[in-house]
């Protein structure tokens, strides 16, 4: 009975992969990848020739049976387009089905855009809420923001560049003025971590067209505009 390995892969920089991940990707009989092109770039870079099959949002139900049969015969590695599989990426259905059939499911930790953005944001990281991609429809997006508006925890969300301006305006309307970090193209050549407030972000991207992949880290309700380090220092001395 095979083991399902959930293997985290780089979110940009190909050096951000663990030795354990590389070993397992080379040893398993098959890799299921959200984007086979991205997977082949990584595998070719490290000289790994393991067969790869596609497993993405559009075919995850159709491919489920074939992947479970592969698990009956041997181990299987699951990788997403970037980062940790199953985190705002396909994987949940396969994990549940594998567990129901008694297969071990083993995480192989590594790169994660939400965690990278959170720890570099300067906002409190001891309690946070990851919301993934916000709903595309404005009404549902606004409703979700209203649900979390009074929570004291730091919020972490993904957003596409073509929706960033609209989302920032809704943050201003629903959450009000808060400290904010906008992380763009993390670990890539044009990585940028911008820190300011919601209103400052609205003003910036009204002048500048958003480009790249964005992770937003937003202060919780009542969050001060100081950094997480300053808050921790105050806790120790207060």
Image (cartoon, rainbow, N blue to C red):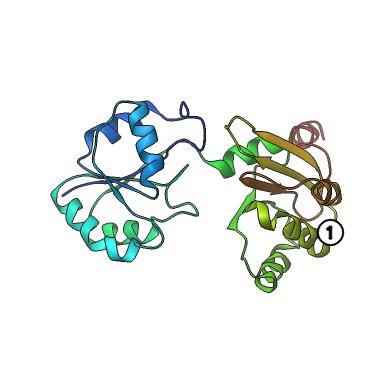
| Residue drawn at 41 percent across, 56 percent down | 90
Q: Which residue is mark 1?
A: 176
Q: Is residue 138 left or right of residue 203?
A: left
Q: Is residue 157 left or right of residue 94?
A: right
| Residue drawn at 42 percent across, 48 percent down | 85
Where 177 sits versus 9, above or below?
A: below
* Quarter of the image that includes the C terminus: top right
What percent of the width, then of the height, locates residue 16? 47, 29
- 129 and 138: which one is in front? 138
| Residue drawn at 46 percent across, 54 percent down | 89
Is residue 7 something one can see in this rendering?
A: no
What percent of the width, then of the height, locates residue 91? 38, 55
| Residue drawn at 59 percent across, 37 percent down | 116
What percent of the width, then of the height, locates residue 200? 85, 47
What percent of the width, then of the height, locates residue 53? 28, 49
Rendered image quadrant of residue 188: top right
Rendered image quadrant of residue 145: bottom right
Where 233 sits versus 180, above or below?
A: above
- 102 and 115: which one is in front? 115
Q: Is residue 2 left or right of residue 91?
A: left
Q: Residues within 10 Å of mark 1 (few under 14, many from 20)?
A: some
Total of numbered circles in the picture? 1
Q: Is residue 222 left or right of residue 81?
A: right
């Amino acid at each position: 009975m095979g083991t399902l390995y959930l293997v985290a892969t780089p979110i940009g920089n190909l050096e951000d992969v663990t030795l354990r991940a590389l070993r397992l990707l080379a040893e398993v009989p098959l890799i299921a990848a959200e984007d086979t092109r991205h997977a082949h770039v990584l595998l070719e870079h490290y000289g790994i020739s393991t067969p790869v099959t596609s497993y993405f949002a559009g075919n995850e139900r159709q491919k489920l049976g074939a992947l479970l049969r592969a698990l009956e015969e041997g181990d299987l590695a699951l990788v997403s387009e970037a980062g940790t599989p199953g985190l705002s990426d396909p994987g949940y259905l396969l994990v549940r089905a594998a567990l129901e059939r008694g297969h071990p499911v083993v995480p192989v930790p590594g790169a994660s855009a939400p965690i990278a953005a959170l720890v570099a944001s300067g906002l409190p990281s001891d309690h946070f809420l990851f919301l993934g991609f916000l709903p595309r429809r404005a009404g549902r997006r606004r409703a979700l923001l209203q649900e979390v508006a009074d929570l004291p925890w730091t919020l972490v969300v993904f957003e596409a560049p073509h929706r960033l301006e609209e989302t920032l305006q809704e943050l201003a309307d629903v959450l009000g003025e808060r400290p904010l970090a906008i992380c763009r193209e993390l670990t890539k050549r044009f990585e940028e971590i911008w820190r300011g407030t919601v209103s400052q972000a609205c003003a910036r991207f009204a002048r500048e067209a958003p480009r790249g992949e964005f992770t937003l880290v937003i202060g919780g309700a009542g969050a001060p505009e100081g950094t997480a380090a300053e808050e921790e220092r105050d806790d120790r001395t207060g």
